[in-house]
Amino acid sequence: MIKSISLCTFLLFSFVAIGQNRVQIQGKLVDTSGNPLSQATVMLLLPKDSSLVNFGRANEQGAFVFKNVKRQAYLLKASYVSYVPLQVDVNPAQEESINVGALTMKPISKELFEVVVRTAKAPLSIRGDTIEYNAGSFKVPPGATVEDLLRKLPGMEIEADGSIRAQGQTVKKVTVDGRSFFGSDPKLATKNIAADAIQKIQVFNGKTEAAKVTGIDDGKKEKTINLELKESHKKGGFGKITAGIATEGRHEVKGNYNKFDAKNQVSVIGLANNTNQSGMSFDDYQDFRGSQAFSWGDEADFGFSGNNRYITFDDGDDQMGIPIGGRRDGFSKNYSGGANYNYDTKKTKFSSNYYFNQSERLIDKISSTQRFFQDKTQNSADTTNQRSFSANHRMSLRYEKTIDTLNTLILIGNGKLSFGNATQNSQIFQQLLVQNNLFPRNTKLMNGSDQQSFSSQNSAIFRHKFAKKGRSFSASAGYNYANSDGASTQKSLNQFLNATTLRDSIQAIDQLTNNFSTKTQVKSSLFFVEPLSKVFYWESFFNTSFQNNRLNRDLSDRSTAGAIARNDSLSRYYDNNLTYNRLGSSVRYSKDGVNVTVGLAAQHFNLTGDFRRAAGATNLATIDLNYLAWIPKIGIDLELKNNRYLFFSYDKSAQEPSIRDLQPIVDNSNPLFLRVGNPNLLPSMNHSLSTGFNLFDAANFMNFYSNLSYNYNVNQVVYNQSINANGVVLTKPMNISGGESYVGYFGFGFPLKKTVSTLNINADFNSAKNPLFLNDVLSNTNTNSGNISSRLSFTPSDRITLYVNAQFGLIHSTYDKSALPEQTIYNNQYGSELNFNFGKNTFLSYNLDYKVYENKTRGLYQEMPILNVSVFKYVGKAQKSEIRLTVYDVFKKNLGVNQNAFQNFVSFEKTQTLSQYVMLSYTYNMRGLSSPIRKN
């Protein structure tokens, strides 16, 4: 009892002592006439180094207050647009609250302007939706990059992959001195430019590229960061080269270098490794492509967003793009390299690049699948070994010419040449359960392929602005072409274990297939904007295209004696044409942050063609589909006061059936899962309603965002699944209406302690009902899924940065009018990341990613803790060299794991992948921006 009283007394006096060491500071900001200066920025700084302790904004009466701050001397600094920055000393005595009274700020006169520019170095200032940080006020270690600097700034978040969030929104663009020289991915600049090259960092809501071109505010905002360079750092180059050697015979070499000035950028990049780094990371990709990586309007399809049509002109990996991604499952050897040149002036922009990549990949995986039918259940256990090789050459050109102030021409060309081959060996054991009777079988697959392809995408865009403000005209033309030439072999052996005769117990397939296909598209678009008044605008557009698809597939059976005979029933030839036209118009109202768009378009498909066994054979089916769809559009964007945004939209889209779904010929690429097309398919349509709200409170850097949407499908393509007595599944696409989904996501972030720690909480959900056809019986799949996650960032000092995160995911599926079992899947993830500075340019970092996969219905459970630890040191006078020792996968637990529940099946898959190894690496950073340029 006495001990308890003593402990309570000690705690009481401790809290009293802590409370006595805290103070409240308040006051009011007014102009020379005594009028309050609302929304003025107020900061508390430490006198010794002007480091930021706390900040806020004055309210409507000009009052401000800092609660519960440490009792010590401060500099109180205030800034307001067009006023001389104010600074006063605050020295708390023993009082609980200090009122500094009314502080008068004076307007800036011309005589005072130069003095203000030289002396005003406040850590941050807030003007409307723009926040400006003085880089010199935030301390980072030598050799730090802009990314390290951003981690120190209030309101900024850096995700594990290097992506940036500012004020709760994803940063879409980073500019340097106002120029979009680094493309649309912000990580290029933040990971490569030295922090000491930056004078200021400005964060604001920029206009979209579409709004800049048309001159009309479309109500859409892009969170943008502008890096203002010091005068001495206006020219230079940057890059790095890394070489590493590791245990288990692993090695890695990669490098890039970029040289740029006001007009030119030259880039080279390359990598070679056997550590599963299959392609360049996205920031390296942007590094490589530079300012012309992505530009608005390059798709050359004008009009509002109801034009959701997807046409692929490439049969290789990743379509026309350079392969992007980190480490993949399995084991791979990778080589790649390329060169890029950009020329950028006010009137001329030119970009060209060539890129080559080669990858050889080995995959060993085991998987289990359950597929449910009304009276049958199919259980499968699959062991698969795959080997694949691919090599790709990619070329790209882009030319943009501002002919004069009114006219702009853009020419774009992309090409790709690909080669590849693959082999697959699978051993599959299946059990078909029918009314408590088991029908087991073994299947052995041995498939191979060899393919090459070529694709090209080309377009021209012309834009004209009239002398009348707001009036503009755009026209585009495009030509796309692709071909693919490949050969494949397919061998399978099916053994039915319950069969009573040898003839019934074994089925064998040995087939050879030759495919040659071409795809050609010619298209054009027109777009016209006419201002009806200062606030109303009329927009009209027309899209047209003609697409031809041809395929010649010859499939032959090979006998045990080696004789080859054409299989007419599985061979096919088709020649299809798709003509597409869309004519639409909309009216936009834009004034004082209110943007309303109402539009309507008529969209017409004409799909004609035929399917045959061979080029000269009789038609199996003839398609002549005409379809007209009316596509409405409603959009409302409201920019409210104090950084609040509200938006609502209604969209409708129409999509023609794919050629693959229309083919009335059996595809037996997988003899256990056959598919056949349906030439009577209609275009599918989707209705979408969406609304959302975003908020950023600049006074305390609190942010909130939310979005809700509803989708309804008409003539949705649903695959009817039927299963025969041998357990072979046949799918056929059909049109069904009624599928719907409710989707939402929310986010909330706020500082627990300004400049020290921030907490972000996010959640999303998807509640969907989709039609399900099983053995010609229609029912519905009800899938409810969601995730909730949190992330805590903690930076107590210049030496320590800690991030902790957790995510909980759930998928729950039920079925209408069916005895199919419910499915519940959990995908949970926990993680933390630490960076610690020991001093003397020596650092420790670790990254822990702990994943848990669980399916209680099937009794599956898998834990996977992945820990990577690094110790590294910057050496040399300018700290450009880095020596790093890294242990990957400390616990040796790395696996490729994937589980899913969809429609009538549930699956679980494990893939052997690169696990524990130790690597010693050396990196040399070529940061041309880290040293001043000498001037004569």
Image: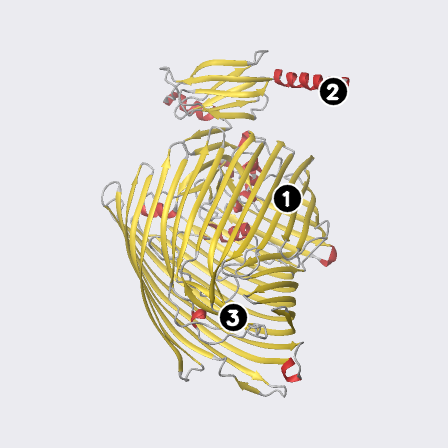
Q: Mark number for residue 722?
A: 3
Q: Is residue 192 visible?
A: no
- Closest to the camera, between mark 3 and mark 1, is 3
| Badge 2 or badge 3: first in the primary sequence | 2
Q: Residue at x 66, y 63 (%)?
A: 366
Q: Which residue is mark 1?
A: 831
Do residues under tags 1 and 2 come within 8 Å of each other at their CB atoms? no
User: Can you say which quadrant of the picture contains the N terminus?
Assistant: top right
Q: Nearer the viewer, residue 499 or 748?
A: 499
| Residue at the far front in the pictured view | 435
What is the distance, in whole Å, between disc 2 and disc 3 at their CAs?
73 Å
- State the mark number for residue 416: none
Q: Is residue 382 above or below residue 593?
A: below
Sequence-earlier tag: 3 or 1: 3
Using the image as rendered, state which of residue 347 and residue 495 is in the foreground. 495
* Secondary-structure class at tag 1: strand
For mark 2, give the secondary structure.
helix
How much space separates mark 1 and mark 2, taking CA atoms? 38 Å
Q: Amino acid at mark 2?
A: Ser
Please provide percent x and percent y for residue 557: 56, 83
Residue 180 in sight here: yes
Question: Residue at 56% across / 66% down in the picture?
Answer: 391
Q: Residue furthest top?
A: 94
Q: Is residue 777 above or below residue 189?
A: below
Is residue 751 rendered to the left or right of residue 208?
A: right
The amino acid beneath tag 1 is Gly
Residue 4's disc is: 2
Q: Residues within 10 Å of mark 3 (few under 14, many from 20)?
A: some
